[in-house]
Image (cartoon, rainbow, N blue to C red):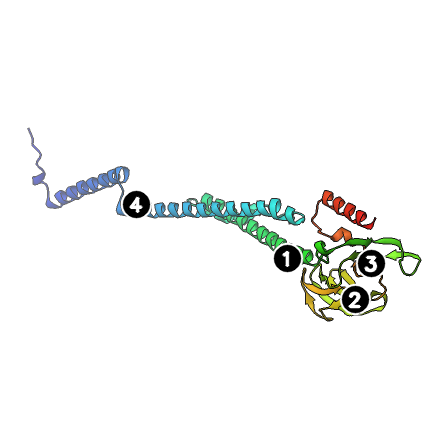
Amino acid sequence: MLKFNINERPRWVRIVVKLFVAMLIAASSNILISTYGDTPKMSSIHRENKRLEDKCRILYGKISSAERTIADLKHRDQFVYRPILGIDTLSIPGIYSDYVDAKYEHLHEDKYYGEISHDMWLRMDRLMRNIYYASVCLDATQKQAQEKAEYSAIIPSIWPIDRTKMRSVSSLFGMRHHPTLDTWRMHDGVDITAPTGTPVYATADGKIRLSRVQGGYGDLIEVDHGHGYTTRYAHLSARYVVEGDWVRRGETIGEVGSTGTSTGSHLHYEVRYRNTPVNPVHYFDKDMSEERYQEIMKQIESSRN
């Protein structure tokens, strides 16, 4: 029987066989490692993917947090600030419409991260639109609030004298029989009787337009409050302000007297809107309830009898 001995083959054959066996072993090992374990390169790729996933989760969390904050601002603006200030909800056409899909088409070219990139950019665009909307809304609300605060300060809204010093309201706004002229004529304000020297207060913020003796008014002060409102204080015994002065609501500007056409110590008080006299009683304590208003009107009517 013929026996085969590899060692009897030529030397180069033996080298080729050994190389083939080594390559076969190396390939098998690579397959096994790739299947059941990571190569250094694959491990590096996995680590990089893990870092990217972690960063995406953090970014998603921040986007979600920003979305909740913007939603809260929008809610407060629409359902708290604007109703309090009495202003309409702001509307910006198309503010909540997504961009066309063509804007995001290039993101899908990345087969590994395309879907994540598309979702993230879409949410970022929505967030930026909401931030813009919230910014515009809050700017408008702030402007309205400032105007409301300014407007509130210039509305005549307090009594021009201390009510504990008031003796009576001798004449109301409207037609009356003039006590000295013996004729029926329009009375443009209210007459509040009080002792001479009783302090007279500015009923709202404003600039002194007149501070002088003027005909039947006697010593007169007129305050320009802006936005069409003025008030007049007549028959004064003293004036503490001069034309051009700026006064605040509740500041003492003069004293009750009986100068000009007057039958006794009292304050003639007028409120004018766009140079048209209006009933001052409607502006006493502008935030009073209807019941309180009726009570004051009864007190005034009783004081006249």
Q: Residue at x 73, y 43 (%)?
A: 290
Disc 1 to disc 2, C-alpha distance: 32 Å
Q: Earlier in the sequence, mark 1 or mark 4?
A: 4
Q: Nearer the viewer, mark 1 or mark 4?
A: 1
Per the image, the residue denoted by label 1 is 146
Q: How many residues crowd around disc 3 within 10 Å: few (fewer than 14), some, or many (20 or more)?
A: few
- How far separated are the C-alphas under marks 1 and 3? 27 Å
Q: Nearer the viewer, mark 1 or mark 2?
A: 2
Point out residue 185 in the picture as x, y percentages from the top left corner: 90, 57
* N-terminal-most mark, 4 or 3: 4
Residue at image position (32%, 45%) is: 46
Amino acid type, residue under disc 3 in the picture: Thr
Few, some or many C-alpha atoms within 10 Å of disc 2 (few <14, some 14-19, many ≥20)? many
Which mark is in front, 4 or 3?
Answer: 3
Query: What is the number of the mark on residue 42?
Result: 4
According to the picture, the residue beneath numbered tag 3 turns out to be 276
**Of the residues tagged 4 and 2, which is closer to the observer?**
2
Of the image marks 4 and 2, the number of the one nearer the N terminus: 4
Q: Mark 3 falls on what kind of element?
A: strand
Between the C-alphas of marks 4 and 2, the distance is 94 Å
Q: Which residue is mark 2?
A: 220
| Residue 194, position as x, y percentages in the image | 76, 58
As shown in the figure, which amino acid type bears the numbered disc 4?
Answer: Met
Which mark is first along the chain, 2 or 3?
2
Q: In the rendering, at what x and y percent does residue 258 appear?
A: 81, 64
Nearer-the-camera pick, 220 or 47:
220
